[in-house]
Amino acid sequence: MTYEHLFSPVSLGAFHLANRIVLAPMTRNRATPDGVPFEYVADYYSQRASGGLLISEATAISKQGSGYPVIPGIWTEKQVEAWSKITKSVHDAGGKILCQLWHTGRIAHSSLVGGQPVSSSAVAPNLEVFTAAFEKVQAETPRELTIAEIKQVVADYKIGAECAKAAGFDGVELHGANGYLIDQFLRDGVNRRTDEYGGSIENRQRFALEVLGAVIDVWGADRVGIRLSPFGAFDDMSDSDPLNNFVTILQSLKALNLAFVHFAFVTGVNEPDALKTFRDVYGHSIITNGAYSGATAEADLEAGLTDATAFGVPFLANPDLPERLKSGAQLNEANPATFYGGTEIGFTDYPTLAAS
Ligand SMILES: Cc1cc2nc3c(=O)[nH]c(=O)nc-3n(C[C@H](O)[C@H](O)[C@H](O)COP(=O)(O)O)c2cc1C
């Protein structure tokens, strides 16, 4: 296959991509307990700099938002210093990298976030979470954020956005997917509030829009994207009417002129035509993701369903994924045992074609 579309350049807002292959954000738990990414994380990202755009692993904006052990953060000087080296190594290798800003909300243990986890509502997820000591325990019931606290979290996102800028990132992606805090506001499976942040979808999207506003103040809309997972059930998430709710959300996002909206797993599930519906409603640039191969990515691009494709596991295991797709080479297999935590093994040692 020639992959004519996959290897054509595209502009998403202010980001000019040499190809349509995006590194999907992937948590790798290679940081200190204070959220400082290890030095060799720079190698992991710079090895993948041939992707048109790299999105960092989800990166916490505050201690309260750091619900997993040894994930990186972006609110202290030490974290900014470490990320600066990573962004420099990506830029030196000719790449572009965004910081995925994260607040885990109720997907957290009190031993990690310095107190009872918080969420839109006091609804416990029915799943196990990790403690600071890496034990798996049943999740606690979170505390409902007060309105004053919601404003504080929005301010924390702004600090995260400023720190991402200070660290030399090219822009930011808000993690609005996969059952974390923004999703916990968006979706009525969790959000039971009766104030202006709950009830109707117009109210449930208020938090996401306020966070976007704060982050846009720092970066400008053309350097900001948001990731959404309209049909995702990950992290015990649910929604009574995802298709219509996300149509409404996309109508609101349309007015913001963001760099992109990034869908994690929008196709399949019970709504085979959802991507087309969302594409038509939104009308601006999108990135799609989820179990893509080079061939299916090319097909969606050719059909005009998307503007760029994010690859997760295939890019994790193949630092030279663009080159491999282009040349039709076989892909390395990923080793899930080294996904979350550990060392350089299973992180920076996947061979390139040239090395194998
Ligand atoms: C190890 C691992 C870590 C992940 N961490 C994140 C994350 O930090 N943020 C996020 O939005 N999605 C995360 N995801 C989801 C991926 O971005 C992606 O949606 C998923 O892997 C499906 O894409 P793929 O089929 O190309 O792998 C993670 C997935 C994996 C495998």
Image (cartoon, rainbow, N blue to C red):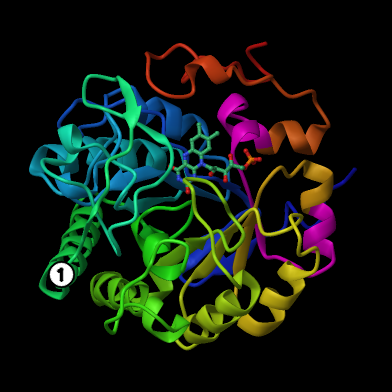
Classify residue 287 by image quadrant: bottom right
Q: Residue at x 11, y 37 (%)?
A: 78
From the viewer's side, name the closer residue of 218 and 2. Answer: 218
The answer to whether residue 247 of the structure is visible from this angle is yes
Image coordinates for residue 49, horizontal then vertical, percent? 51, 39
Dividing the image into 4 quarters, which one contains the C terminus? top right
Q: Residue at x 71, y 82 (%)?
A: 280
- Whether residue 317 is in magenta: the answer is yes
From the viewer's side, name the closer residue of 30 and 264. Answer: 264
Residue 188 as seen in the image, left or right of residue 21: left
Image coordinates for residue 134, horizontal then vertical, percent? 29, 20
Dividing the image into 4 quarters, which one contains the N terminus? top right
Q: Which residue is mark 1?
A: 146
Residue 135 as seen in the image, left or right of residue 126: left
Amino acid tagged 1: Thr
Image coordinates for residue 329, horizontal then vertical, percent? 80, 26
The range drawn in magenta is: 298-321
Q: Residue at x 27, y 29 (%)?
A: 69
- Up the image or down, 77 lies above or below 237; here it is above
Residue 299 as seen in the image, left or right of residue 348: right
From the viewer's side, name the closer residue of 68 and 201. Answer: 201
- Whether residue 262 is in magenta: the answer is no
